[in-house]
Amino acid sequence: MLPTFLIGASFGVTASTVGWGVVAPVVMSAIVFSVAAQFATLAVLGAGGSVVTAIIAATLIAGRFLAIGVAIGPSMRGGARQRALEGQGVVDASLVLAKTGEGRYGVKRLLGSTAPQYLGWTTGTLAGVLAGERIPDPQKLGLDALFPAFFLVLVASELTDRASKVTAAVAALIAVALIPVTPPGIPVIASCLAVLAGRVVAR
Amino acid sequence: MRDVWIAIGVMTVISFAIKAVGPVALGGRELPPAAERLIVLMPAALLSALVMVQTFAHSRDLVLDARAAGLVAAIVALALRASVLVVLLTAAVVTAGVRAL
């Protein structure tokens, strides 16, 4: 929860420095609840981009939840409405935290791991916007490095065998290669293709 | 400020829809074993790509800046079996330090 709190705080501080006030960032964290999509919106609007551009960027960034939903979806039971609601509890960390093995995911584990993150994210955002007035430049504190470091910790716990290591390496290459040539968001979605490489070496 | 609220409203709906698609379409299904073997590898792919994008992308530009130093420091901290919090703080402190140079 503390790591999520810190990242929430970095979002709050950044939002506050571009003049979003106190309420909007906290409301966004509470109802959008998508770290990367929120930072994407902030980046575009904060740089003076149009709201349409911001929405497109955030949608592309959030697009990876299609892939994550495909990975976790089959493990969900119950009616379609219940599954749609349970799907809202899926965050990036769920791929690691809700895992029960063999490509299956536990819904209880999922919701149980998301709840503290939700709390950390929203309270962190609030703390960030409140502190934001006194932090003119969040980059000076290196707050933008928290987010990749968090994903680094998550991916490290995934690298258990040859297949996963090859997958991660190929995915990293795909992402880096696509950053300059595709809109933001696409590199991460396209990196899913790396699982094919991982599969090949696992044979 | 109006744009901020529009973005929040629209992203709430879009984010809900995106997160609902997989569970609604595939919930309760038994996937073929071949598909499951691919799905097991998805976290490694997505998370690794996220690290790269968050470290080396500045909108559509590939950049090498202080965040890279923070990432290297985080990898070292991780290799030394530091806790998650220490890894995060190490990344932030080193990134801030390199920026201040």
Image (cartoon, coloured by chain):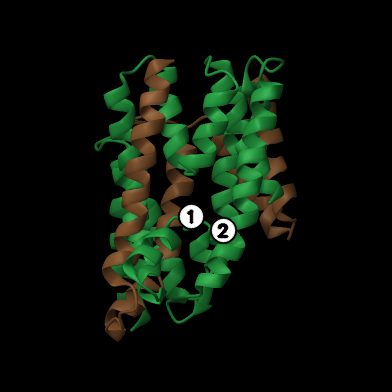
> Which image quadrant: the C terminus of chain A?
bottom left
Q: Label 1 amino acid?
A: Asp
Residue located 53% across and 66% down the image: A110
Q: Chain of mark 1?
A: A
Indicate the secondary structure of the residue bearing disc 2: helix
* Chain letter for the part of the structure drawn in green: A
- Depth check: give the residue in front, B22 or B6: B6
Q: Is residue A76 above or below residue B33?
A: above
Number of the label disc, if any, that sits on residue A154 = 2
Residue located 57% across and 25% down the image: A23
Q: Earlier in the sequence, mark 2 or mark 1?
A: 1
Q: Which residue is mark 1?
A: A92
Check if mark 2's residue and mark 1's residue have beta carbons within 8 Å.
Answer: yes
Quadrant of res A147: top right
- Depth check: give the residue in front, A86 or B50: A86
Residue located 54% across and 40% down the image: A30
Look at chain B in the picture and name its colour.
Answer: brown
Residue located 58% across and 43% down the image: B71
- Report crowding for label 2: few under 14, some 14 to 19, many 20 or more residues within 10 A (C-alpha): many
For this view, does A164 lie left or right of residue B96? Answer: left
Quadrant of res A143: top right
Q: Chain of mark 2?
A: A
Q: Label 2 amino acid?
A: Leu
- Where residue A21 appears, x then y in whole percent? 57, 18
Quadrant of res A87: bottom left
